[in-house]
Image (cartoon, helix red, strand yellow):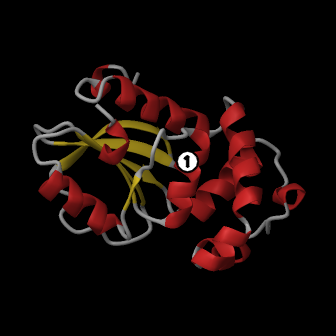
Amino acid sequence: MNLEQHILTECFVDTLLLRTIAPPTKRYNHQKSCNNVLKKMREEFLDKAAFGIIDDDKKVTSFDDFSLLKKHNEQLSIYQRENKPHYIVKISKAMEDFILKNAEKCNIDLADYGLPSDLEGLKMITKHINSLKEAEIKFKKLFIAFKQNEETDFYKLVHWIKLFKVNPYGIKNELW
């Protein structure tokens, strides 16, 4: 079974991130908001495993049926829907902040990748699909550097995605 369509991303930079750090054989299931990720899980994956990645910067409706499984740190947590093999990874606050905090943690200078080193500068690129497409190669190189560093939250995210792909109905037993 190809589980890649069961992995839901909320925005373009999240999708680019996953395509880079955990390349799919086909493609991931891109949605256009946190609420669309949750809606898709509830409607199309009712009795199937699903794994969503959302930012924690927006108001998410009806998240109360999910409970915390593991908090890796302030930037990365995974939740499970009650009695369902539905998992949500929350990236705090938003992907741009996540990138900046991990760059700082690993002493990576975003300027070395041709990217801005401030929140607003990153948002100018990531929030606009045309700008993101122009900077795609720069982000891919950065994401690969993050993935290779065991100190980053990207490394843990790859681990969780791999666990889901291998055992989507038993991921919670292997998170620790």
**Left or right for 174, reference 25:** left
In the rendered image, the quadrant that contains the N terminus is top left
User: Which residue is label 1 attached to?
Assistant: 19
Identify the residue shown where x is 30% and y is 45%: 6
Q: Position of residue 4 (x, y in %)?
A: 38, 42
In the rendered image, the quadrant that contains the C terminus is top left
Q: Which image quarter: residue 175? A: top left
**Left or right for 152, reference 61:** right
Q: Position of residue 106 (x, y in %)?
A: 77, 41
Position above or below: 148 against 45: above
Residue type indicated by callout 1: Arg
Q: Where is residue 127 in the image (x, y as percent from the top left)?
A: 57, 76
**Left or right for 85, reference 37:** left
Position above or below: 87 against 165: below
Position above or below: 94 against 46: below
Identify the residue shown where x is 65% and y is 38%: 152
Identify the residue shown where x is 71% and y is 32%: 148
Counting the numbered discs, the total is 1
Q: Which image quarter: residue 33? A: bottom left
| Within-10-Å neighbours for mark 1: few <14, some 14–19, many 20+ | some
Q: Can residue 142 be seen at all in this image of the molecule?
A: yes
